[in-house]
Amino acid sequence: MSTAVTHSSEAEHAEHAEHAHDHGHDHAHHDLPWYRKYVFSTDHKVIAKQFMLASLIFLFVGGAFALFLRWQLAYPGQPVPVIGTLLPSQWVDNTGAIAQDFYYQLVTMHGSIMIFLVIIPLAVGMFGNFCIPLMLGTDDMALPRLNMWSFWLVPPAGVIIMSAFYVDGGYAAAGWTSYPPLSGVINSPTFTVSGQTLWLIAVFLIGFSSIMGAVNYVTTVLNKRAKGMKLFDMPLTIWGLFITAIIITLGTPVLAAAIAMLFMDNFFHTSFFLPDNLIAHTRHGIEAGAGQPVLWQHLFWFYSHPAVYIMILPLMGIVSDVIATFSRKPIYGYKAMVFAIAGIAFLGFIVWGHHMFQSGMNPLLGTTFMLSTIVIAVPSSIKVFNWLGTLWRGNIKFTTAMLNALAFVSMFIIGGLSGVFMASAPVDIYIHDTYFIVAHIHYVLFGGSLFGIFAGIYYWYPKMYGKMLNESLGRKHFYWSFAAFNATFFPMHIIGLGGHMRRIHDPSIYEFLKPIEGWNKFVTIAAIILGFSQLFLVINILWSLKYGKKAPRNPWRANTLEWAAPPHPGHGNFDRDIVVYRGPYEFSVEGRELDYWPQWEPGKSISVHHHTIVVDEKQESNAFGTH
Amino acid sequence: MDFLKVFDMLAWFPENISTFGGDLDALFAIIYYISVGIFFLTFGILGFFLVKYRYRPDRRGYNYHGNNIVELTWTILPTILFAAIGLYSDEIWERTKYSKRVPKADLEILVMGKTFGWMFLYPGADGKFGRNAHNDRSARSLITLDNPFGIDSNDVYGKDDFFVENQFKVPVNANIVMRGSSVDVLHSFFLPNMRVKQDVVPGTWMNIWFNSFKPGHYEIACAELCGTGHGGMRGQYDVLSKTDFDKWSDSKNAEMLAAQTPAPMASAEPAVADSTKK
Ligand code: HEM
Ligand SMILES: [Cu+2]
Ligand SMILES: [Cu+2]
């Protein structure tokens, strides 16, 4: 396999890479055909870029869908401005207004795309691939070929889920949660491919991809750490990804099983989730069945609650690293942070029922799940306090990466607090399935995960592409996004408390929703601004690729191992042997001139009362660590 | 000044008309005030640190790795706070949702969701339901779109059971106990003013109960995605004074009687005494 090849010629390749990034990206192996370099590559960095490209494209598809549905909510039945009449006839009526059945497809596809094709692939696929080998100081993943496949299941899944455009009835329309019987019963004979069938196939493939990636991450973290690197020398990014990978290996198979069952209900008309004597939508009854619709919810949330942590734990790690680097401070309570991640991961498996308080599940179980859910807020708050502790007495530089990381922390506080409301089962009676939930998920998934992803992109882009991103464009992107984000999603709490249900196409028919009509318009306008703000990011990424400032080896003066690699590392990553001498967060060590002390630099220190003090600093080796 | 409402989340709730709704809203308020406190505390600290410790070239960060006593403190304090919220919530949860805490019914109604509407079955003049899919599971095979409750037309107790669609009427200050289900997909029976929300699941029956102290005209909605017409699954209900309600149900009973040839008097004991249980 190619790793074997790289080992022997590691130094040579890296050397080559340093020179080659001047003239574009033509740095990789000349002994590999082009499609192995750029398409079916086993190089973890190429795979990371592939995840990034695919997911950013889907980010815009999902975002566009969101804007369509926002339009309908604010101005129900009115033609979509400008492009209304240009849209496909399945989407709009002849005046150019969103068709009612397309509205429900929009809600479903927006959620599904954002979760399965954007946040998970970015958080786990992109950062997992990019960061794990580099931050562990190794040449590649333990199982590069499996890794390649974990990416190459995603584009087909994307194509399959989107191809429902050409199917009778259009895209799946049962929500990203796909509760049966709605998702199981179709109005057509067996063996009919509907949007829902395609949805199930696509999500199954993505689950498969996740599992392959996760197996690989766990193996790599356990086996391929650089010499001298103990588990507790790993940066929190790696801890976040490692524990996420464990969650994936435990949770995703359950989703796969559930999806297989639902697929059979949907396609072969079995009845795992369908009770007897069901009157299917309008046309035909299903004969068989002693199935249980609520069973799906248990199986689905057994995966999907842990999945919300799959979507945030890697970013918690990344944000920790960014905050430590730009505060020039060690993480406050590194071990507490690791234990909090592990605690969240464990508790994450016993709280799924909080999505089901009103599902008809025995209310006795509601009590259990309420208590476990409330307990999970504890490790979350520990993390917040430790981030604040890290900022305390720092020397804080507001780079774009840092701004986004701080947005993560503050938005996560709000999202966590709204979580506590819903965790209280009696309060959840009223707010369940209203916009309050929508506000919550966007505070944690956009305010949290996506801002975390932005932070990671701004932070590692220099290592990824050898160019610096433009800071002033980055700032514009951040400020516009941050303001528009809050204007879009904060009022959703209010809309939810007004009683506005999720996933309804026309709030204007309800008397009790009149008071919040104005908010719906306000939110829509803010959402449009939010959508267009993302153009700054795209422009920045593309512009910097060509015109960006050349990145130095360690632009942020950080400590972790990826910064020991050349600016735009080639296959094999490092141009010299990596040995780890200390933990990842030795910033501002007393007795040292530089305010950082990379993991790979030799030198001895002792720890006195939680301070690190230099004993023996090998200054001469610093030449390699600095610019 | 209306603008200030933005900062008072509690002002946005629709009017509460149910006896337990006050408890739920009060619990919301408690968590809300705690959250506002935590919000200002954490954001205050965050803002303060960001200003105070902003980059200055002549300063260095502080190499400090944390302190176990501090960690322990900020583990234990939130645990106590959150556990208190949890235990206090549970008391209210048990009171409003536990099956064995459902109060004795003054009026029992069956509710059935379908795509896309709500149907309500009243026990009629005798106050008893006849055999139907709720009290006899085998009657599920009788369910059709025209007979959504699977009513057995041979059962004399069922002769006077009447049903209404997308609207119902209940007396004020009475314990209304509904048993809810669905004929097709999931729906969620949502009475915003009554602070009632319960998913209804085909094949099983859910307990829904409430007691309203305020007569008026209100709306029913569906809170669980159920298909293309989900957003339009609007219904209405009235909370009536006892006399108005009696008048309405008498007229309904009279309608039912008129529609039927006089039923033979029941000779046999009903198979089940409690009309809600098999
Ligand atoms: C303090 C921590 C948190 C608590 C206590 C919490 C609690 C809850 C509860 C109780 C619900 C169900 C609400 C309902 O449907 O009625 C919920 C929904 C949700 N939460 Fe959280 N949550 C927390 C953090 C997170 C995080 C970190 C994420 C993701 C990164 C997240 C993502 C979601 C999503 C996506 C849903 C909605 C699922 C759906 O119905 O579509 N939550 N949360
Ligand atoms: Cu959850
Ligand atoms: Cu519905």
Image (cartoon, helix red, strand yellow):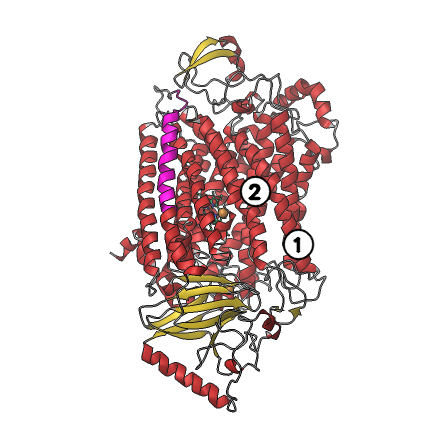
The answer to whether marks 1 and 2 sit on the same chain is yes
Q: Which residue is mark 2?
A: A120
Instruction: Estimate the x, y position of residue A292 in percent, counting from the top left.
Output: 60, 59
Q: Residue at x 44, y 61 (%)?
A: B197
Residue A31 visible in this rendered orientation of the protein: yes
Task: Name the disc covering residue B275, or none.
Answer: none
Name the main secondary structure of what is drawn in magenta: helix
Crowd class of label 1 (few under 14; some 14 to 19; many from 20; radius 10 Å): some
**Of pointers 1 and 2, the one earlier in the residue sequence:** 2
Front one among A570 and A414: A414
Q: Which residues are magenta?
A: B63-86
Q: Quadrant of residue A187?
A: bottom right
Instruction: Estimate the x, y position of residue A312 in percent, counting from the top left.
Output: 50, 40
Task: Name the disc covering residue A261, or none.
Answer: 1
A380 is higher (above) or lower (below) than B59:
below
B70 is higher (above) or lower (below) than A265:
above
How far is disc 1 from disc 2 in space, using C-alphas? Answer: 23 Å
